[in-house]
Amino acid sequence: MSIQIPRGTQDILPGEVEKWQFIEKKAKDICRRYLYKEIRTPIFEHTELFQRSVGDTTDIVQKEMYTFEDRGGRSLTLRPEGTAAVVRSYAENKMYGQAVQPVKLYYFGPMFRYERPQAGRFRQFVQFGVEAIGSDDPAIDAEVISLAMELYREVGLKKLRLVINSLGDSSSRKAHRDALVAHFQPRIGEFCSDCQQRLETNPLRILDCKRDRDHELMTSAPSILDYLNEESRHYFETVKKHLSDMNIEFVVDSTLVRGLDYYNHTAFEIMSEAEGFGAITTLCGGGRYNGLVQDVGGPDQPGIGFALSIERLLSALDAEGVALPHETTVDCYIIALGDSAMEYTVPLLQELRRAGLSAEKDYMGRKMKAQFKAAERVNAKYVLIIGEEELEKGTAVIKNLQTGEQENVSLDNIVEILNRG
């Protein structure tokens, strides 16, 4: 019996992994320009972290987390999302005391959720995310959104839709919560068991239900925008103005609530409108989470961030027919003929690589013609041919595989010649 990969996971093979590397490099460069610094947190955390931050009433905590007990009897969970761990690290390492504020961070890493695998969705998936913690300026909300949009733009996506909403402050959300309970309670028996439970624990989650999203009460539900107090309304208007000033197009959707309990004020999603992308169009989601730092044991510090799936970004690129550039050229392929020449190429290969050149040789005992074929397969720029006769003279034949030109060169000058190109 052969052992196969677990359901909901994937192998990223050579030829495909270069696309991931391109996206990672692009994201890191954008973060450099925006002055976000990389943070790396553990793949597993104490389960309580996600229960307190993501929320007990969310599908993630109730249905999707990979939770286990270690040998010490502690309940641990493979991280289902990145924000909680970053905020925990921010509080634990007292980053709020740093001289430079707000603290601007980004991360890459695998996340884990037990859900039904489908196109672009996996049980192990990779997120890129950013967090800006320590400022309640609406301008930082706009900056975080612009960073996400800039990444999509720079990798070549065009068919995008930015949707934003305000969830308001605590008093606005309480007024909206009461209105939602009054709206849904008379007919809550028509909804799924999850929604019936959410009516008491977090009625806002009902608006995020996938099973009952077509129920008529969903479209007539009270809008959070009608319950924003003056401060929350002004905050949202300022965020929108900043986005407009940056020429970032958006639409307001009062039903956008996101899937995590820690959001307040600004919430947003970026969606693909590419034909054939699939029924689930969300590429990226994020929002403001004032109060989350305090929930995990830190001081009362505001924050905002987003996370996006690299897998879904790649799917959107495929849907739009965008090909990512990646360099696979080898500078030099060494063809050795004869035992002495083959022995000589071992240290020569090391010398070329230490000089910063990509180089390869035959390890399969192939004949000369087959070695040329191997050089073509790895897209080598040059072939360096060394036989017994050349070795005695201290020379080699170098051939440009693009032009077909070749010449005899001194072995002492190989690095210089290849660097000259």
Image (spheres, rainbow, N blue to C red):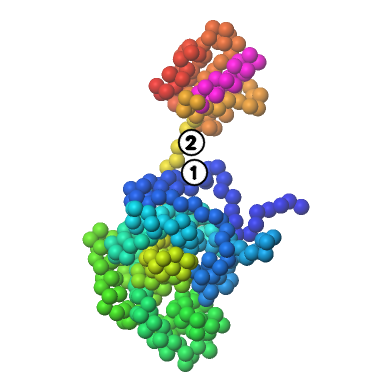
- Residue 76 quadrant: bottom right
Q: Main secondary structure of the magenta part?
A: helix
Would you say residue 343 sits in the magenta stretch? yes
Residue 86: x, y in percent?
47, 58
Q: Is residue 416 left or right of residue 241?
A: right
**Residue 372 position (above or below residue 141):** above
Q: Is label 2 in a helix, a strand or a loop?
A: loop
Q: Is residue 187 visible?
A: yes
Residue lying at 31% horizontally and 61% vertically, measured from the top left? 140
Task: Report the quarter where the C terminus lies.
Answer: top left
Give the residue number, with chain letter if any, for mark 2.
328
Would you say residue 80 sits in the magenta stretch? no
Q: Residue furthest top?
A: 393
Mark 1 is surrounded, within 10 Å at the Cα level, by few (under 14), some (14 to 19) or many (20 or more) other residues, namely some
Q: Tag 1: residue type?
A: Glu
Q: Tag 2: residue type?
A: Thr
Mark found first going from the N terminus, 2 or 1: 1
**Residue 18 image label:** 1
